[in-house]
Amino acid sequence: MSNMDRNGILIDESEKFLDGSLFAKMAQGGAAQLRANADEVNNLNVFPVPDGDTGDNMSMTIESGVAAMERIESSSLAEVMAALSKGMLMGARGNSGVILSQFFSGMAKGFDQIDRADAEAVGAALQVGVKQAYRSVLTPTEGTILTVAREAVEYAVKNLNEESTIRTLFADLTQEMYTSLQRTPELLAVLREASVVDSGGAGLFYIMEGFNKVLIGEEITDAGTSRKAAAPAVDFSGFTEDSEMVYGYCTEFLLQLQRSKVDTASFDVAVITEFLQTIGDSIVAFKDGSIVKVHVHTMTPDKVLGFCRRFGEFLTIKIENMSVQHSEQIEAKKEEPEVAAPPKKYGTVAVANGAGIESTFKDIGVDFVVKGGQTNNPSTEDFVNAFSKVNAEHIFVFPNNGNIIMAAKQAASIYDKAEVHVVESKDLGAGYIGIASINPEAETPDEAIAGSLEAMQFVVTGSVSNAIRDADMNGVHITNGDHIGFIGKEIIASCKEKVDAATALVDKMFAGPDKFMVTVFSGKDASAEENEALKAKIAENHPDAEIYFVDGGQEIYSYIIIAE
């Protein structure tokens, strides 16, 4: 057998195998490479408005995985890959982030029980990753991250031979991933019209490019940029030498079950849950493989840790005095239902951005609002934590954004303390009307939500935001800096003034049948004068309409308009 690769380069025997130590470095490099290019991926937005967030979502997803991976010390590929995968699963944000987490979850399954893998075994694991990514999407669309992953893996695996190394495999993978990415506009008309490549595919390419750079010893320049949000400063004035402990400690940790202590495969997390109920509340405990995640509010965190250490060792621990947390967190704690109280039949969780919108949702019956939306997609773990705040047998979840649905569903599949039903509200209007239409007296969940699903069909939601580039879409010429009115993926108008764009948008929305009510959520950049001018325009053009204005306080969108 030759010791030269196909390019005539002497093969180092260490390049024949991928172990956990090398893969950890590759994952760190992939995260850094994406982090350095996240803004570029964000800007690969089909719509020329500043709401692109794919780069941030995918970056935060893999960063969560890397953080989990860095908490273990192992050279086993299976163990390192499993830690990365679990971290990505809980940190997944946005549809592309969820698909990315599923791709790596599939790879982790492919590496199960493998401490180090040759190029052929790595190729096989990549193929498992592609299959799981496709399965995670109800209706896979070609021309997206799925296509880029599949075509690149197929190409790299096809080129494997007895001289292949880990380096040649990832060189082929990265090369074909770039080529496949450039072909995505040929498969998706919306990309072709916007003159961009698929953003999710671009994010995956940058990750693999980072993998490849580590393998060839090339430095990754990310200019110290970090996509992680800085931790807010803690106000310790809430707890002084004269204070009494009232709220207890918010205690969270990841517990790695140990074979020397328990049968990890058959271990029932109910053992932990039943104990926690005797000394705490706001309990979340679930098992993912051989790792148990626990969240509890308790006066005695030492007892929690002592009890749980019977079964394994801690990967992470976070204990916070809830009296010194931000007032917002304290208020949220006050609003939580007492665990001792019997659960109500139905509860509701919704995603919203903007103080006014959040308040409105609570007024119409939402039990817990997950803060987020476009450019700020909540993670799988954010949803799991939200579910734990709702004391109900059945929880209806309204993501209110098409890019958040997959994370909500992934969280629903993990959470086992209630039956979670994800209502696929793809915009704020659908969620707003759907929540208001829930029947709390219904016998079954299907009956409770039937009216919501019907009402959501007749709602139209439009938005106004500013253009970030020149474009021609849907027969509308857009000039950078204009204000764009759009419904879903359809551009309605592009105007110099936001009130004109919003007026044209409402006129289009009322052109359909039976629209008689309009609710306008005004954003942070909409002035009181502009709101009054828009209200007058709507009243003039549609004298029979019922008009409601709410100070939504949302980012990105000057106006979110709901017609029903």
Image: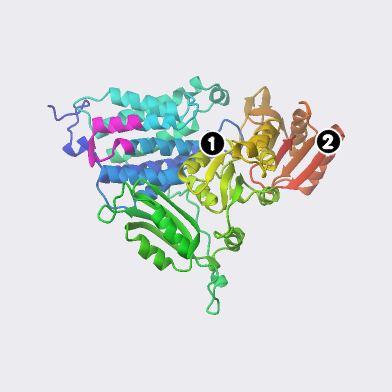
Query: Looking at the image, which residue sits at the far front?
Result: 443
Of the two numbered discs 2 and 1 in the rendering, the one whose residue sits closer to the viewer = 2
Query: Looking at the image, which residue sits at the far left?
Result: 1
Q: Would residue 210 appear left or right of 506 to someone viewing this image?
A: left
Q: For the residue marked with disc 1, what is the amino acid?
A: Asn
- Region rendered in magenta: 109-128
Q: Which residue is mark 2?
A: 545
Between 199 and 415, the one nearer to me in the picture? 415
- Specify the quadrant that holds the N terminus: top left
Q: For the residue marked with disc 2, what is the amino acid?
A: Ala
Q: Would residue 281 appear left or right of 166 to someone viewing this image?
A: right
| Residue 362 image position (x, y, % from top left) | 67, 50
Residue 124 included in the magenta stretch of the image: yes
- Specify the quadrant that holds the C terminus: top right
> In this rendering, is residue 247 above or below 219?
below
Point 39% across, 49% down: residue: 287
> In this rendering, is residue 511 above or below 431?
above
Query: Looking at the image, which residue sits at the far bottom?
Result: 242
Few, some or many C-alpha atoms within 10 Å of disc 2 (few <14, some 14-19, many ≥20)? some
Disc number for residue 418: none
Few, some or many C-alpha atoms within 10 Å of disc 1 (few <14, some 14-19, many ≥20)? many
Q: Which residue is mark 1?
A: 43
Q: In the structure shown, which secondary structural element does the residue marked by tag 2 occupy?
A: loop
Point 71% across, 41% down: residue: 559
- Sequence-first disc among 2 and 1: 1
